[in-house]
Amino acid sequence: QEMEDIQQGKTNRDNVLAKSKIGLLSILKEFKEKEDKIGEDLVKGLQRYWKDTEELGSCPKCGDGILRIVQSPKTGKRFVGCSNYKDGVCDQTFPLPQKGSIAPLEKACPHCDHHMIKVVSGRRAWETCINWTQCPGRQDDLKALDERRSKQSHKDEGGKNS
């Protein structure tokens, strides 16, 4: 509206700028007064976010620690590790897929009762447990996949000989 008033000659640019400056200074003053509180709230929000996206739940090995998604500073690889590792109490770790984003799920694996995660890589998304290298359910999935591939291979070979 004020831009139209300037164009129509009802007010001038300097008046609009002065009015805007007063409004901005008032907002900045209030922001400065509440700066510490805003910072604290941002930190709390980030901590909640990190907790929700990095913590999976209690450690099955020591029962006392929290399993977290972490990244090795040395190798850059992601894995799940127990929070008691630094204290030397627990050495529980689980490997994670290295590509894609990972989000914890609020459910346990029906086969091994470990925590479940959702992995999104490109357009694909899948759910797996953190114990995917040892999970009996995963082994069943791999066997079923091998059987499907074997059947497909036999179909392909049969079609060529006809």
Image: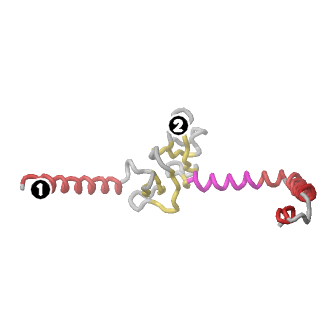
Mark 1, other Cα within 10 Å: few <14 / some 14–19 / many ≥20: few
SS category of the residue bearing label 1: helix
**Residue sitting at the far front:** 8
- Label 1 amino acid? Gly
* Secondary structure that dominates the magenta span: helix
Q: Where is residue 120 drawn, in percent x and y?
A: 47, 54
In the image, 110 versus 32, the foreground residue is 32
**Number of the front mark, 1 or 2:** 1
Identify residue for label 1.
159
Disc number for residue 76: 2
Residue lying at 55% horizontally and 44% vertically, measured from the top left: 70
The location of residue 113, given as percent across then percent down, is 44, 58
Q: Is residue 109 above or below residue 81?
A: below
Quadrant holding the N terminus: bottom right
Q: CA distance from mark 1 to mark 2?
A: 47 Å
Residue furthest out toward the left:
162
- Quick one: SS at disc 2? loop
Q: Is residue 96 magenta?
A: no
Quarter occupied by the C terminus: bottom left
Q: Amino acid at mark 2?
A: Gly
Count of numbered circles in the view? 2
Q: How far from the left and from the top, in percent, is residue 140?
A: 30, 56
Q: Between 35 and 23, which is closer to the camera in this rendering?
A: 23
Q: Nearer the viewer, residue 25 or 142?
A: 25
Q: Magenta segment range?
A: 41-55
Q: Residue at point 93% right, 58% down?
A: 15
Percent position of residue 139, x then y: 32, 53
Left or right, 142 with reference to 82:
left
| Residue 123 as seen in the image, left or right of residue 106 | left
Sequence-first tag of 1 and 2: 2
